[in-house]
Every structure is written in C-alpha cells, then in structure tokens.
Amino acid sequence: MARPDTPPQSPDGGESLLGLTEVDPSPVEETPSEFKEGYFPSSQPASSRTSTLGLGNHGPAYYLTRIQKYSSYAFTIFASFHVANTSLIPLLTTSVPESNRYLLLTRPYYQSSLTEPLLITIPLLAHVCSGVALRFYRRAQALRRYGAESHRDRKTIPWPAISGTSMLGYAFMPFIGFHLWTTRILPLYMHGDSSLINLSYISHGFALHPFVSFAGFTALVGIGVWHMTWGAARWLGMAPFQVGHTDSEVPREVVKKRRWYSINGVAALVTGLWLAGGLGVVGRGGSTAGWIGKEFDELYRSIPLIGKW
Ligand code: HEM
C-alpha cells in the first residue's frame, strides 16, 4: 500500500512527469496529414488574381494617389531647371542678359514638342485632376459608409477635411495659370511663338508694373514652394502626421513639432533663395529698349486689368 506522503504511481510506471506523456516536437515538414490543408496561412492572399489589364485589384483611391504622386515627380524635374534658370544663375551672374544665355541653353530640354507635355502640361493636369477626383471619391465613400439616402442626409455629412497642402495647391492654381498664360500661351497666341520670351521680358514687366509683379511673383514662388515642400515631405513619409510609434526617448509630440519646423524651414529657405534671384536680380533688370521692348509692351498691354494700369 502506498504511503500518503509519496506521489501516486502513474499508469506508465513513473516514466512521465505528473502523468503527462512526453512526445518529440513535430518538425514543420511533418504537419499532421489531417491539417495539411489550411494548417499554415497561405503566403498568397486569396484574391491575388490580376485584373484584365494586369494592373491588380486595387480601388480607385490607389490609382488616383499614384497618379498624383508620379505626376509631381515629373514636374519637379522642370521646377529644378526653373529655379536654376530664374534664380541661381541670375544670382551667380548678377546679369539678366548673361542669365538669358543659360535659359536658352536649357530651354530645348523642357520646351520641345515632346518634353513640354511630358514634364509640364500632362503632369500639371494629371496632378490637379487626380486630386479633385480623389476628393469626390472620398466624399462618395463617406456618403455610402454613413448610408446617406436623401439630400438632407447628404447635407449633414461633412466633406472630407482639406489638408493645408491641398489648400496651398488650390491657391497656387490661379498664380501658375496666370504665369503660364503670360509667358507661354499669350506670346504663342499673339506672335505665333514664344521664342522672344526670356528673363528680360519678366524684368520689363517689373519696370512697367512694379507692384503687381512684386506681389504676384512673391505669391507665385511662396505658395508654390510651400505646396511642393509639404507635398515632398508627405511622399517621403516625413510629414508630422506620419510619425508612427517611436521607441526612442523623444516623445511623439516633440518629433512632430521638429518635423513641422524643419519642413517650414526648408520652404522658407528655398523661397528666400528663389526670390533673391527672381526679384533681386531679374526684378531689378530694368526695361528692354528697341523693337523687342515694343513687342513686350504689346504683350503686357493685352493682359486684361493689368494692361490698363
Ligand atoms: C521669380 C520667379 C520666376 C521667374 C523669374 C520665372 C520666369 C519664367 C520665364 C522667363 C518663363 C518663360 C519660359 C522659359 O523658361 O523659357 C517661365 C515659364 C514658366 N514658369 Fe516661371 N518663373 C518664376 C517662378 C516660377 C514658379 C515658382 C513656377 C512653378 C513652380 C513657375 C512655373 C513656370 C512654368 C510652368 C512655365 C512654362 C514653361 C513652359 O511651358 O515651357 N515659374 N517662367
């Protein structure tokens, strides 16, 4: 008879610990046959079938965001040329006629019949249209999600919030539109081509209409650079709202604040640099004499409102 202070004998004669049988671990390859199907999750998602065009099964927001992103890359190529031509080179040469030579040298790269649509027209249109379409798509999603049925329901559901970057983008449109129209479309329409247009044309405009030119170019450059810098920060995942969970000692709010200051610092620096060359050198270049000056006068006179001042 077993003594009361000794553990009871297990049925396997004491080979197991507390009555449990020890078994060897099962290697992965030896998955029990009854679990062979569906034991481990498949590495391929169930619906990985590509669509008819082979583009994958993503929603419209996926494609619209990508169009908005890649179109901005193309325009950045032109903007880099442009900041060099209209600011850095004038700052280095401190002469408008001298800077015009460099402008003409690089112009074929962004103003040919192939590169102008690829670097300027199509990216600008695609960028704006995809942004507007994305906003309408998100609005439609919100209406569906909240089950809006009547006109009254729709009115109670707010539109998706507009980010500061988007607002800057919309504010930029009239300025870039006016700039494109005065430097490219109007000369083409009036004279058949815009080959006479160079930095002297801008200097002439400053001499004729100093206030409008000064305010207009400051707004064009300021709004444009701020929009592009915040946009670039977002594409790079460096915007303040994109700060994820941090293991570092620095609190999340501090990281966000640092990013906010850095992005605005970069935008202020680029704007200052662009304006130093654009206003400080090109803006003070003075008017052009002779027949070219007369052609410039004619162009500026044909601009509604400004032409009358
Ligand atoms: C002080 C600043 C600026 C000056 C002096 C200036 C000057 C000029 C000039 C002379 C042209 C004639 C075309 C050429 O480049 O040969 C032009 C065109 C143009 N500029 Fe500016 N610009 C300035 C700022 C900007 C900014 C901030 C943007 C937008 C990011 C911009 C966008 C454009 C575009 C899209 C064209 C038309 C180019 C084409 O279709 O070939 N500009 N600008």
Image (spheres, grey):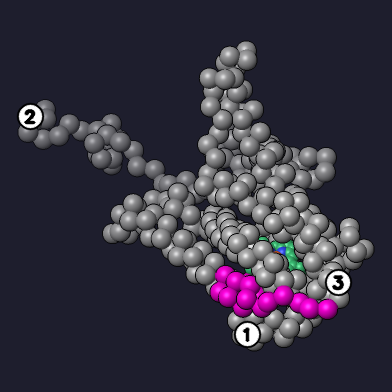
The N terminus - image quarter: top left
Q: Does residue 276 appear to the left or right of 62 in the view shown? A: left
- Quadrant housing residue 72: bottom right
Q: Is ligand 1 less than 8 Å from the beta carbon at label 1?
A: no
Q: Relative to 92, say whether 18 is above or below.
A: above
Q: Nearer the viewer, residue 156 or 200?
A: 200
Is the residue under label 2 in contact with that under label 3 (CB below 8 Å)? no
* Discs 3/2, front: 3
Calculate the distance from the C-alpha at mark 3 to the C-alpha at mark 2: 110 Å
Residue under label 3, please give it: 195
* Discs 1/2, front: 1
Asked whether residue 277 is drawn in magenta, I would say yes
Q: Is ligand 1 less than 8 Å from the beta carbon at label 2?
A: no
* Residue 302 visible: yes
Q: Is mark 2 on a helix, strand or loop?
A: loop
The stretch of residues the image draws in magenta is 275-290
Which x, y percent locates residue 295?
A: 84, 69
Q: Relative to 275, say whether 141 is above or below.
A: above
Calculate the distance from the C-alpha at mark 1 to the C-alpha at mark 2: 105 Å
Asked whether residue 166 is drawn in magenta, I would say no
The C terminus - image quarter: bottom right
Residue under label 1, please give it: 94
Residue under label 2, please give it: 4
Q: Name which residue type carries label 1.
A: Thr
